[in-house]
Amino acid sequence: MSIFNVFTLLGGLAMFLYGMDVMGKALEKQAGSKLHSILEKLTSSPLKGFFLGMVVTAVIQSSSATTVMVVGFVNSGFMTLRQAIGVIMGANVGTTITAWVLSLSGIQGDSFFITLLKPSTFSPILAFVGILLYMASKSDKKKNVGVILLGFAILMTGMDLMSGAVKPLRDVPEFCNLFTLFTNPILGMAVGALLTAIIQSSSASVGILQALSVTGAVTYGSALPIIMGQNIGTCVTALLSCFGANKNARRTAVVHFYFNLIGSVGFMIIFYAINAVVGFSFINDSINAAGIAVIHTLFNVTATAILLPLNRVLEKLAYMTIKDDEGEKEKFQILDERLINTPAIAIEQSRKALRNMASEASTSLIKSITLLDKWNAEKAEEIVHSEKKVDKYEDTLSTYLLKVSAQDLSVRDSSELTKILHIVGDFERISDHSLAISKISEEMHTKEIQFSTQANEEIKILKDAVLEILSLTMESFVKEDAEAAYQVQPMERVIHELAREIKNLHIERLKNNSCTIELGFVLSDLLNNCKRVADHCSNIAIALIEAEADSFAPHHYVKNLKRDHAESYYALLDNMRAQYKI
């Protein structure tokens, strides 16, 4: 084997790993919008979790990515440890698909059908179709499909280069003797675990072993311990990802490790025990790529069949390894940074966090409006606490979404991220105005001043209108209801008109000496805060509507609304004016 073969081997390895990375990320991106809805359907059934984990991993071609996602979900509190166990086991089975695809390179035969199945035949075709889709298509989905095909073609080309580069080693006695060392179970498992831990992908390390199998030096006896070690080494990614996570998330990574460790050691003990009694005749035979895929699949399926019914035992082991401190309570962090590498999931988590923030801001506004009728110090304190909580939400969400925006996003994910960034500031400002209205009530209570009966009647109509626009905004936001969102804009106009009319009526009362200047300042503050709340509600509704058209131009939208939908807009406006008439 010459130095040029070494160069070819390294180049092939680089292409293989790069192709696998590109294909995996593109598959993940293509399936991203569906991944969350799939995982959301998880129940307490380990069997259902197993099938879902298997499907997700088969789609994104990475058990490590699935496991890290699961760790993030458990850390966020959206998945229990028991649910996670089934998904992890399913991920281990789903990852065996890659080995079977790679084994196609070992197909022998000269018939047209057999030749067509060989990667050396269809890879160039896939690469050509992929580059056409990537360069010529304007559709984000078609571009993703093109990247998937290109990634697969690069992966298979790298596999062929590696296989071709190592073929001369079949005639090197030292290389053949090297693999006899790996028949030692402990050494073989250590080598497999180390290789997988370094490249952080069991699929990739299995592919490298499949490439080496063309030399004929790899036997069943040497391949088995290496494959078992590869299953243990793949746990490194999840174990690294759980640093800084809560205890249940760490237990999830530990369950992944125990599953592979117990399964691998158990499989080895059973295999070598039977071999000692029966004496397998094939153990010293050369293994090919398909044989490696068979062992990889057989191990994962067998280990899952045995350990899935024992999921509670694995759960107890995890609790014994990572114990609860007395009196300690887990704190869930919705926006888990482990999920950033899967943007669709991260954005869905951001949407959930925004819903929590919106609920907090909405409840705070309702409380502050009730304080105008009757002062309550306890409620006022709750509003202060809520405002601080909403501020924290805004800071955390904005920082998190900026990190997500640095990822390679699909058009849909990018639009959703932009929408959330637009809305988050408006909910934070609604919370600020809730606090300001609460302070107005406190001032009136402290100074023992109150509005006249007539002014109170006018303000009641304004308060009802504010509660109505808040209700429409929350309905349109939570349910993503465009019909409710379209009603917000005319409602905002009605609130501004009410505020102007109330101000004018107050001026008339000042002229008649039936009201005071001091109350005028308080009223002015109240009216301004109500108008600002309406403005922010309008901004949220417009952002929801504009997100559908992938455009954020509020002033342009309002202008078009009054021009293109004049009849329906003014009909709504007239109805609302009649409903909230002073």
Image (cartoon, grey):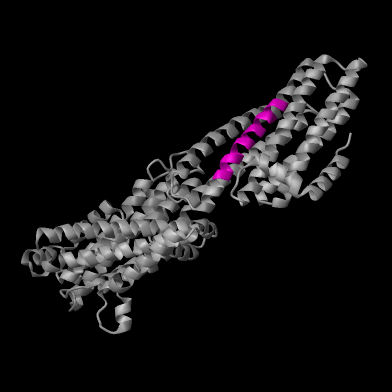
Please state which of residues 398 and 440 is positioned toward the viewer in this rendering: 398
Q: Residue furthest right?
A: 512
- Looking at the image, which is closer to me, 16 or 141? 141
Against 119, residue 554 (above or below) is above
- Residue 396, x across and y down, in percent: 51, 36
Residue 196 visible somewhere in the drawing: yes
Pick the residue in front: 94 or 90: 94
Which residue range is magenta in the image?
418-437
Name the main secondary structure of what is drawn in magenta.
Answer: helix
Residue under the image location 50 percent in, 52 percent down: 344
Percent x, y for residue 365? 71, 34
Q: Which residue is painted at 32% across and 59% down in the image? A: 19
Compared with residue 191, is residue 493 higher up or lower down, i.e. above or below? above
Rendered position, 464 above or below 228: above
Q: Quadrant of the C terminus?
A: top right
Q: Is residue 426 magenta?
A: yes
Tell me the residue at 20%/78% (across/down): 278
Measured as percent of width and height from the top left, residue 328 is found at 47, 38
Front-most of residues 310 and 464 = 464
Q: How many callouts does the rendering have?
A: 0
